[in-house]
Image (spheres, grey):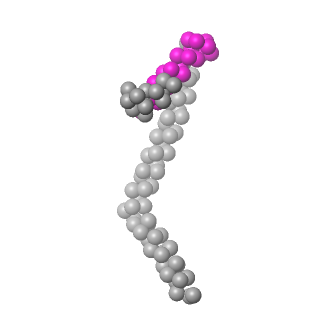
Amino acid sequence: MIVIGGILGGIFTTTEAAAIAVVYSFLLSAVACRQIKLADLPRILLDIGIATAVVMLLIGASSGMSWIMTMAKIPQTVSAALLGLSVLHGSAN
């Protein structure tokens, strides 16, 4: 309700809503349910850092690959090849 209400009410953006959801979940699990202890925080933060690094590595690699493909004009070549196949197939009928 907090996230959806805040977004629909114009109180915060979707990115801010994600941050608020994280803080709310942390407070709920640490304070209300007492599932996270202070000693667990370094391990949790390390796991979060590793997961974030993996995602950022994937984003960086895909950005580099898309730049290389654009400079090599691979999308245009593939598109022309596929259009050439449909023209050849269409003229056979």
State the image coordinates of residue 82 (x, y, percent, origin top left). 50, 73
Give whichever of 35, 66 is nearer the camera.
Answer: 35
> Can see residue 13?
yes
- From the viewer's perspective, is 93 left or right of 64? right
State the image coordinates of residue 90 (x, y, percent, origin top left). 53, 83
- From the viewer's perspective, is 71 left or right of 58? left
Magenta segment main secondary structure: helix
Q: Residue at x 38, y 26 (%)?
A: 11
Give whichever of 35, 43 is nearer the camera.
Answer: 35
Locate the C terminus and report the quarter of the image it occupies: bottom right
- 80 falls in the magenta region: no
Give whichever of 72, 33 is nearer the camera.
Answer: 33
Q: Residue at x 39, y 32 (%)?
A: 13
- 25 falls in the magenta region: yes
> Can see residue 39?
no
Answer above or below: position of 43 versus 68: above
Q: Residue at x 42, y 50 (%)?
A: 63
Q: Residue at x 51, y 25 (%)?
A: 1
Span highlighted in magenta in the image: 15-37
